[in-house]
Image: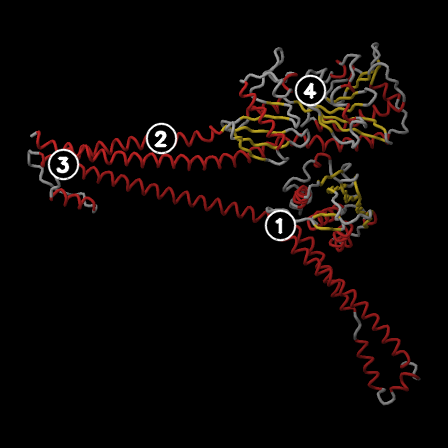
Amino acid sequence: MKHALAPRSSLARATLLKMGPRIAVVIALTTLFSYFHMLNTLRHQNLVQLEQYVSERSQREQTLFVLAEDNHSLLKAALEKRLLALRQEDPKARFDSLFVQLPDGTVRTRAEHFDGTSAPCLFVPPGVRLDDELRRRILAAYDVLVQYGPAFHTRFTDTFITLPEGVHLSFWPENPTYCLDAAPTESIISQEFFPPTLPENNPRRRTVWTGVYQEPISKTWMTTAATPLDLGGRHVATIGHDVILKDLIERTLEEHLPGAYNMLVRDDGQLIVHPDMKREEGLSPDTLSSATAQSATGAPWSGSEQEAAVLRDIFEQVKQRPSDTLVREMSGHHLYLAMARLRGPGWRFVTVLPASVVARPAFVAARTILVLGVLALLVELGIMSWVLKKLTRPLLGIAEASHRVAAGDFNVTLDTSREDELGRMASAFQHMARQVQQREEELRQANEGLEQRGRQLKEVHQQLVVAARQAGMAEVATNVLHNVGNVLNSVYTSSQVARERMTQMRLENLNRLADMLDAHQSDLALFLTQDQQGRHVRPFLRKLGEGLQEERKEILSLLDDVGRYTEHIGEIVKLQQNYARLPRLREPSRLSELVEDALRLNAAGLGRHRVRVERQLAPLPPVLADKHKVLMILTNLISNAKYALDDAVASERRVTVKLGLEGSECIRIEVSDNGVGISSELLTRIFQYGFTTRAEGHGFGLHSCALAAQEMGGSLTVHSEGHGRGATFTLELPYHPAS
């Protein structure tokens, strides 16, 4: 018996030794391939998600900063206008009714009627000479803050105006006693926001942003936007918004991608927000310590020296990056960085994603595949060992049964009545056949379920693709129809005028002249020289020829306009088709000609509405610009100005177009009307997608114009004194002279 079992045991061992390593190698290679494939796929998906996330977050976070600068433009114009209005007024009586001089020498808001929720407070340090000119400036600043402070409070904590003499007016409902709490020795103009607005520090007189600092009176950590106002070459006031950093810090630290973290850093490497930064003892958790705003080498740090070194390398990457959103890999530290610049203070929003976060799912999946492969290998080797131990040699019945099972026929019958080894083997084979049949049925059912699920997913995917395509086509078609409609009005007008010209040509006189000449054919010479009627033939023919030439010239000019308008329609369609691709190349263009073309495109509508056009076009050399985008913007602005004049008196309807240089780096084109105007609450929404104030409007024109201006590196803004006082749209473009 031992002699019979020896070969069978040897056969099983030899077979297992040959098959086991081969299967193990296949499992290892499959696991390795699966790991790298999933790692590459997950890396690509995570980097795309990271870039999209940082781009969207930066756009959302910078909205408040951009809005602050827009508000300053409005406040600056309002304050300048108010100063001019109070120039001849005696301010003393109203000044004394609002403010009072205290025993400490300061002048402050009268406390008996002040609650801080509807009016600003005033602080004048001791020693400031209050003449009538200073009182007027204080009252003008007070009036502007009363008018605009409550409206701006929905987005900004406070709005303030500081005069160079140290006078400070603030609208801060959450801290209404700010000016009343200030110490008499407090120097407002020495705080961080004021020196950068002085002429010697800010010759270009633009809005500046401070760094992160703690306001000394309220003890609040903030950053400030400050804009200087000059009158007659003299610095008369500084307008400001404070942006409290508490909410920004909480959003930066708490709202992040899984496994990643966010940070804010300035261009000079000054760290603003980081998860591992310590806070100074004694300060509340929602404030920054003075050391928090230091560089990585000097800030209190809760991490290790190695983590500090990583942070310094991140700073270097931030300094070297361009202004657009960018994803970079720091292979030395196994990190991915996504960076975007916030307009306004110029901070950099950075998201750091460790490479381990990207690789972990791939590693877990590969480990699962490996474990399952090893288990499958062990199961297969166990089954093989069991089968080999029971099998002594191939038998014809089992071979035939094996062929039948391989062909899909699991109803095999073997002789299991024998008590010996062959009977047990036959019984095991039948049992195995039944198990295989059951598993085959289970696999078939599972496969059918997977196929049905796959079909459902494919149908859903197709529906999403069709929906996305239809949405994109609808938006493109809307923009094309809006712009083409403006040009088609001019095409129709030009063709109608040409038709009227042709109708008015009195060519029947030529037939009468021919009949007259035929009647005097025999004495034509005498008729032309001596007859009273015949002597007028030659002058008549000369005038008729001159008139026909003039008519031909006018008709050709109208047909040229039709051709140019038709060409512009084609350019509009091409422009919209290329909207999502690379921008058009700039080409030399004369902006004055583009303005005239835009007026010509709207000439018919302006004429119908009896609108008078005033031109103030400075002679500028050719500049590099995308002339079709500029023409599209101007055409929309002039068309909107025309409709804004519908309710105005016909004899007073006026559109003014100005063209000139703003400094040495900016071209400024203004389209003004004296029509219905825009209320202050609508000024911030006028460029939103789908927003319109006209019943028949669709809200796409100004939105697409604003986007086109941004693509050219410029901006499109609007200003209006209110309802019924007209509006001015300003297009600013970078000045690039054509060589």
Q: Secondary structure at mark 4?
A: strand
Circle 4 packing at 10 Å, graded few (<14), some (14-19), many (20+), is: many
Measure the alpha-carbon separation of dots 4 and 1. Answer: 46 Å
Please indicate, yes or no, whether residue 330 appears anywhere in the rendered image. yes
Answer with mark 4 or mark 2, whichever residue precedes in sequence: 4
Residue 728: % across, % down? 77, 41
Answer with mark 3 or mark 2, whichever residue precedes in sequence: 2
Tell me which amino acid carries mark 2: Thr
Measure the alpha-carbon separation of dots 4 and 2. Answer: 52 Å
Residue tagged 2:
368
3 or 1: mark nearer the eye = 3
Answer with mark 1 or mark 2, whichever residue precedes in sequence: 2
Residue tagged 4:
213
1 or 2: mark nearer the eye = 2
Tell me which amino acid carries mark 3: Leu
4 or 2: mark nearer the eye = 2
Measure the alpha-carbon separation of dots 3 and 2. Answer: 34 Å
Answer with mark 4 or mark 1, whichever residue precedes in sequence: 4
Tell me which amino acid carries mark 4: Tyr
Q: Secondary structure at mark 2?
A: helix
Q: Which mark is drawn over residue 576?
A: 1
Measure the alpha-carbon separation of dots 3 and 1. Answer: 77 Å
Is residue 3 toward the left or the right of residue 439 in the image? left
Answer with mark 3 or mark 1, whichever residue precedes in sequence: 3
Here the colouring is: secondary structure
Q: Which mark is drawn over residue 391?
A: 3
